[in-house]
Image (spheres, rainbow, N blue to C red):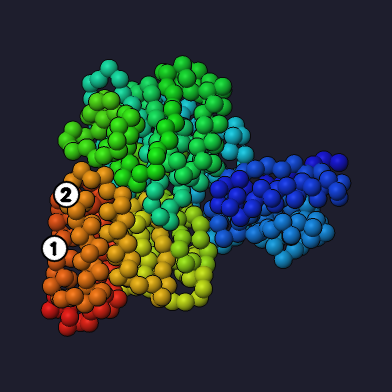
Amino acid sequence: MNATTVYVSRDAAALAADADLVAAAIAAHADGAQAPVSIVRNGSRGLLWLEPLVEVQTPQGRIAYGPVRVQDVRSLFEARWLQGGAHPLRLGPVEDIAQFRRQQRLTFARCGLDDPLAPVPWNGLRAALALAPEAIVQQVLDSGLRGRGGAAFPAGIKWRTVAQAAADRKYVVCNADEGDSGTFADRMLMEGDPYLLIEGMAIAALAVGASKGFIYIRSEYPHAIAAFESALRAARQAGVLGAALLGTGPAFDIEVRVGGGSYVCGEETAMLESLEGKRGIVRAKPPLPAVQGLFGRPTVINNVLTFAAVPTILERGADFYRDFGAGRSRGTLPFQLAGNVKRGGLFELPFGLTLRELVFDIGGGTANGRPVKAIQVGGPLGAYVPEAQWELPLDYDAYAAQGLVLGHGGVVVHDDTVDMAQMARFAMEFCAAESCGKCTPCRIGSTRGVEVIDRIVLNHNRPQQVRLLRDLCDTMLAGSLCAMGGMTPYPVLSALNHYPQDFGLLGDDEQAA
């Protein structure tokens, strides 16, 4: 009797929902029922509200069941699930689930399909090896790819700057210090399709003439670290990395460096300091890292999602990628939906949909059924978006025009019980705790911000304190060395502007302030 292939996610989100126990229960029950199975630990499909999601290769195709608990395994076998039998947990093919079917999966096309270390064709890298370096850069430029780390700077311009810089050595650095609340795309990709990231970094090395790469992964991601290191070993053994890329190209290898838990090391120059073995504090610019970066050499720095978008561009062409998106925001963004939401997970979609579509049509609204009050977009330093702006298209420029940021694509939903004054206070408190301390607006401003918000809430000369808070935010916006202090006012001012009642302000009070 041939064994039936059963896929059980090994993604960290699935593991947190006891996926290991579910896999063990399936194996044990299959032995007892004399129904041989071959269990493949794949990556996540991103439908996190269904984890552990289990898929079975049946005569009718690959059928999903979920969320599967240990206590469900017996009834699944009794329902002949290995043949695709009916069961309350039966979802059908994942591709037919409405929230999955709506997506346009480019970066995450392979994620969740197989063992993350299963062989891949490396088509993007092969296409790059057939091009001159300047032609690779031009493909990235023509695609319209912008950095997915939050700043949205055109990736091709950064690559061209490094390529044109004269130096005896150049570097490619991947910023995988994914520290924003409500974001998990980097982790999910490193765990579910690490070869794609390796391929993107190798293409960047070809484009700029780098022979060494580093990936800076946050220490809180042990499963991602293990998965990526395993993928690096396999890529070296297969001759993809090392003395010659795919056996024919120039030498290039990648080294993993693990961060120590500092949020500010997500800022590229603080990350470079940490990579060099120093305290992670922000550097003054200029010089830009593209000219004088790691160890003083020209360095390409992009985040995981930026590098991971590149193989598709090289394999299928710049025009193919540019056809997705809206305005100057081309391609897709893996939106990560979290917080008080019914269907949380990762949804890769072209730029241009609205927040209302994402949170309500795809996410299903709040998990507890209460009204949505505020949606924070762009991480802990992103603005709170009120209902009046939920129809804005999700693209970099439309959001920037309203003083908003898309950031890394994290979206956190809050219901009507949230106290927005306390959320504003948390932003200042978070900045005070995580600041590198180099610049006064960030180091001192955040501490004073906590005190001022407390005085507003306690009605200690409230109008004057509101004016003081606004002045303080202006100073932090204009005077901070990096986005740590420069973006902290975004959640604070958006909370104050759109939810004044939570600060004890009425309309007349706010006008007086």
In this image, 182 relative to 134: left or right?
right
Nearest the eye: 504 or 225? 504
* Residue under pointer 2: 440
Dot 1 or dot 2, earlier in sequence? 2
The C terminus sits in image quarter: bottom left
Residue 133 seen in render: no
Residue 280 picture quarter: top left
Nearest-to-viewer mark from 1 and 2: 2
Q: Position of residue 485 (x, y in %)?
A: 23, 52
Per the model, the C-alpha gap separating discs 1 and 2 is 15 Å
Residue 214 picture quarter: top left
Nearest the eye: 458 or 252? 458
Circle 1 crowding by C-alpha within 10 Å: few under 14, some 14–19, many from 20: few
**Residue drawn where x is 18% and y is 38% of the image:** 284
Residue 197 seen in render: yes
* Residue under pointer 1: 471
Residue 38 vs 408, above or below: the answer is above
Residue 39 vs 448, above or below: the answer is above
